Every structure is written in C-alpha cells, then in structure tokens.
Image (cartoon, rainbow, N blue to C red):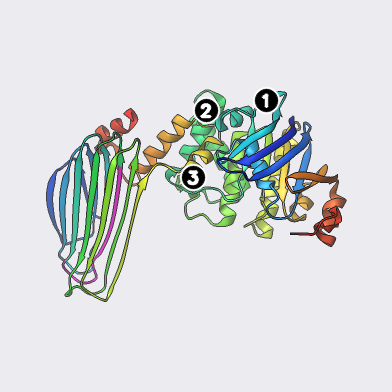
Amino acid sequence: MLNIKNLSVKVIDSDINILNKLNLEIGNGEVHAIMGPNGTGKSTLAKIIMGHYQYEVTNGSIKFNNKDITKLSVDERAKLGIFLSMQDPTVIDGVSNSEFIRTAQNEINGSKTNLYEFIKNMEFSLDDLKLDSNMIHRSINKDFSGGEKKKNEILQMKLLKPKFIILDELDSGLDVDSLKIVCKNINKYLKDNKECSILIITHYPRILEYIKPDYVHILKDGNIKKTGDMKLALEIEKNGYQIIGEENE
Amino acid sequence: MNNIIYLNGEEHKEFNLEEDTIIYHFSIDKSSDITINLNKEDITLYYYYNNINYNDNNYKIRVNHNKSNTKSFVYNHGVNVNNSKLHYWVDGYVPKKSNGCDCNQDNQIININDGNSKIWPNLLIDNFDVNANHAAYIGKFKEEDLFYIMSRGISRKKAYKLLLSGFLLNTDSIDKEKISDFVDEINKL
C-alpha cells in the first residue's frame, strides 16, 4: 500500500535535514508502529506523507498503491485515501464540524452526500465515540478538550473512510477511558475494512496494547534503525532507546 | 437577548441603548461611523461587524460606557480584497464615573492581496475598576488551517471559501435571510 524509498526531507528554506534516506514498506491490512526519542522525525514523517507545506522532499519517493504521490497536493493525497490524525488538531473558528465533514465527504466522493444518510451516520459515530451531539454545530476543535479533539479526529476518520490511516501520537491528551473508546473504534474500523493499513506514531507502547502492531520500527536521526514486533516496543519501554546502540535523547 | 438589530451597510449611526443588545452589521465596500452609548447600568452589548472591502474605506466605531457595570464585546472582521485602503478605528471608552465595566474588542482583517489595512484598537480607560481587552490581527489565513482542511480532501479553493465564510459569518445566531446580499457577495469571492 505505502512504499517509501530513500526518502530525505528538509525544512523548506533552511538546511535542516529531518529524514535521511528512510525506507518503509507497509502492506495492505498491516499495522505498523514507529517509536523514537523526541525530535527524530516521527511527526515529520507523518506530515510529509500528507504533503505538509513546511517540508521539502530532497531525495527518494513516496508511493501509495504504486502511484507516486511525492508531488501531489494535500487534498489529492486525502482523496486517494490517506488520513492523518493529527497530534495537535487545529482550531478553526467559524467553520462548523458538520459543514467541514460534509464538504470533505462531498469532495472525496465527488458527489453530494445525502443529508439523511450523513446525519444518520454522524449520529451513530458520535454515539460510538461517546461525543456530545452538539459538537457537530461547534467550530472545528474550538473550546474542545484534548480528548474531544482526538475523538473528533477519529470521528472524521470514521465518516471519511480512508484506506491508510496515520495516527500521530493519538494517546497524547487522552485519558485511559477515552483511549480505550478511541482504539475500540479504530479496531472496529479495521475489522470492517480488512485492506486498511495503519501507521501509529507513538512514544509509549500503551496504545499498542489496544491496537496490535504487526511491525514496530525505531526511528532515530531521521532513519529507521531497528524493526521488530511488539516485543521490541516493550523492550524500549523497559530499557529505553539505548538498545539501538546510541544514547537516549 | 430581546433587542437584536441588523445593519446592512448603514454609514453613520448613533445608538443610545438601555437594554441588552446584539447588533449585526454587514457592510460591502462602504465606510461607516458608528457610535454606541451604553446608557443604563448592567446592560451588555454584542457588536458583530463584518465587511467585504474593494476600494478605500474607513470604519469607525466608538462604544461609550456611560453607566457602571456595562459590558461591551465588539468583534470586527474584514476582508480586504484588492490592494486598497481599509482602516479601522475602534474605541472603547470608560469614563471615571463608570465602575465595574467590561470593555472588549477583537479586530481582524484578512488581506486577500496586498491591501493597505490598518487597525487602531483603542481602549480609552479613565477608571481603575475595569476589565478591558483588545486584540488586532492583519494578515492572511494561516497555512496550518488550510493544511488541516485540505488534509480531509478539500481543495485549496474550497478550503479558502470555508474559511472566508466562517470568518465573515462568525456567529451561529445570524439569520442569513436578512443578509442575503452579503451572503451572495461572499460566494463571489
């Protein structure tokens, strides 16, 4: 599904290199996790897959279902089925959640979503996530708690039905109960969409107890230094990042 | 609130208020000069000014807290489409005789191109017992906001429209039927 080859990335208008010849292949239906110390490029990887404006690909390619997406715009990538659940979702005053999600559905599907279907699906999804139904009339993420913001990301995921999901530090800002609810929804989505793949970016293995990864990668200095399974995540939790041979940051 | 007033492009107006009031002011390419007197204790004013600008224009508003414990919340949002002048003078005045007032203003102008936009967010306070806030922003929509919207499959053009509409119709309580010309103008942007 996702094939990243020799990817080097720098911050636009600077000489700061973030990723350095990174390789990563994610197959259909696979769950991958990327762990690593602060400042090693985990979130940059998530953003560059989505096409963030602050970064520039200086080498290599990102292919999604064999299509090179390196030069595609952000919305074109989303229309192909890529979804980024953001670490710190943006607050947008004046634009309601319902207007936003409905516009996104119309754009992705290429046709106007039936209003009745939209409301019905929205109500089911709000209930699944234990979100107050009034939130759909509120401005995007405005005055939302940290947990509500993360749940709103997963609400959008459920309604936009992506093929590839990036979860960038989903567990930050979520209490234990909310994390369980959110992960339950993601697992249900995976069960209903067998081909869907996930890339989890996290500092801690706690989220991986709820969404089981097939592969765990350790990212350091802009490159994947080690790949394993859940045991590797638990080993990191126990011993820190020294196990990859360098001092923890 | 019982007293809700819609202004569609009125240029010069003075209000003497004695009850809680919301004023929605929509202006397309016009200068305006508004004075509001809060003449009864404990009353609250919400003022929402939204304007689309093409040529050189000035907007002046002055809120006089003539009585104690009066509150004002003034929100001024403008979109300057061309490279023309758009200047806001926003005065909140609390005289010495008025205690316990709450005087707030939030001003934003989005330049679509390279307009000459300026804001003077003045708080004229002659009393120690007051809560006063002012803010002013002139610039473009944030790239991070556009990125977020586009990351859900919405084109840059439509993302911009969503932001414009949200910026200029920034409260849920507006009766859009009363401002149909303004809504049509947003759709032309």
In the rendered structure, the answer to whether residue A58 lies left or right of residue A105 reads right
Q: Which mark is residue A107?
A: 2
Q: Tell me which amino acid carries mark 3.
A: Ile
Q: Which residue is mark 1?
A: A68
Read off the chain for label 2. Answer: A
Q: Are marks 3 and 2 on the same chain?
A: yes
Q: Are marks 1 and 3 on the same chain?
A: yes
Judged from the image, the secondary structure of the residue bearing numbered disc 3 is helix
Q: Position of residue A42 (x, y in %)?
A: 69, 47
Q: Tell me which amino acid carries mark 2.
A: Glu
Q: Quadrant of residue A176?
A: bottom right
Task: Give the alpha-carbon distance from disc 3 to disc 2, as whole Å.
Answer: 19 Å
Judged from the image, the secondary structure of the residue bearing numbered disc 1 is strand
x 77%, y 36%: residue: A23
- Span colored in magenta: B66-78
Say whether residue B74 is magenta: yes
In the rendered structure, the answer to whether residue B129 lies left or right of residue A145 reads left
Please identify the dominant SS of the magenta region: strand
Q: Tell me which amino acid carries mark 1.
A: Asp
Q: Nearer the viewer, mark 1 or mark 3?
A: 1
x 38%, y 38%: residue: B164
